[in-house]
Image (cartoon, rainbow, N blue to C red):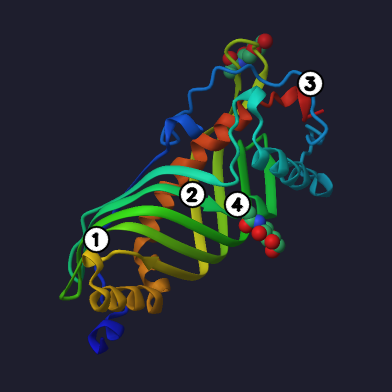
Amino acid sequence: MLALTNWKLAISLCIIAAVYVRPGSCGAYTREIVNDKPPLQERPAWLKTCKRSNPNEDKCFRQLFEGCFPALAAGIPEIGVKSFEPLNIDQVSVSKGSGNLVLSGGFQNLVIRGPSNATVRRASLDLERRLLSFELVLPRLRIRAKYNLKGNILLLPLIGNGDVAMALKNVHTTVYTRISLRNETRTGDEIIHIDEMKVSFEVGAMRIHLKNLFNGNDILAASINTFLNQNGNEVIAELRPDLELGLADIFHGLWNNVFSKMPTKLWLV
Ligand SMILES: *[C@@H]1O[C@H](CO)[C@@H](O)[C@H](O)[C@H]1NC(C)=O
Ligand SMILES: *[C@@H]1O[C@H](CO)[C@@H](O)[C@H](O)[C@H]1NC(C)=O
């Protein structure tokens, strides 16, 4: 245990997180979501309008963006946008590691509760420079999933599969995107398309509990769980670059699916 808690930043690892989303729930987030529903043709009550000449005036775009959240959380079946409360993610794969941490396997059937409580700290749309960015604060995310992991932490083997519960507090996400204006294929309506996305995040605190490690050997399981909880921020820091890529994959597809169904004629006036 002493060695474990001293381990801290002595991790050197390379984790590749690949994220796939259950096709039935939200489509393949890694690429474009296939959604053949027609775009909105009338402006729903929850969709505010902003000036095309300056969408950010008086924080208009921020309010517009935040105003969409309750509808997105509930889902908008008529345009093929699934509920994101809870957010279902099919799989997060973890493969490869080196040094003191070696892990392979991943998490399946993730159910993430709390995204609908996001507050939009900042959001801006720059049509001239083709940039759209936003910052979200998620006070609390509760994640339930199945896990299947095999590897080593220091000299301890880590092996198991079963249920995992995770809680993340004060998740602060910043998303920068490069956009283009496109014509929706069927209606010809102008829509925003996200071409590139970069996500970064900070986590205030993490709790994690992996059940059924080592086929139920409680003593070994307790030391791994204790270690992961005591070193949560360091573990996240090591995984951050790859998790950020994984999240960008998810959000890229998710937001394109939304924007492609919201012609700019409805909200940029
Ligand atoms: C949203 O926040 C409220 C107040 O903190 C909380 O009661 C509720 O459970 C949260 N919703 C979700 C889905 O986490
Ligand atoms: C979209 O359609 C308009 C005319 O309806 C056309 O002028 C414009 O070039 C098209 N834009 C793209 C990106 O194809």
Q: What residue is rendered at 60% in x and 38% in y?
A: 83
Is residue 268 rendered to the left or right of residue 115?
right
Quadrant of the snapshot with the C terminus: top right
Q: What residue is rendered at 46% in x and 28% in y?
A: 32
Q: Dot 1, how many residues are within 10 Å of its Cα: few (below 14), some (14-19), or many (20+)?
A: many
Reading the image, the residue beneath label 2 is 111
Query: Going from the N terminus, do you reach mark 2 or mark 3 first?
Result: 3
CA gap, disc 4 and disc 2:
11 Å
Evaluate whether residue 197 shows in this view. Answer: no
Q: Hey, what amino acid is under mark 4?
A: Pro
Q: Measured from the top left, where is residue 126 in percent x and y?
A: 67, 40
**Location of residue 235 (image quadrant):** bottom left
Residues at circles 3 and 1 in contact by the CB criterion of under 8 Å = no
Q: Which mark is residue 42?
A: 3
Q: Which mark is residue 160?
A: 1
What secondary structure is found at the residue carrying circle 3? loop
Q: Nearer the viewer, mark 2 or mark 3?
A: 2
Residues at circles 3 and 4 in contact by the CB criterion of under 8 Å = no
Q: Measured from the top left, where is residue 147 in percent x and y?
A: 32, 54
Reading the image, the residue beneath label 4 is 115
Q: Dot 3, how many residues are within 10 Å of its Cα: few (below 14), some (14-19), or many (20+)?
A: few
**Location of residue 149 (image quadrant):** bottom left
CA gap, disc 3 and disc 4:
27 Å
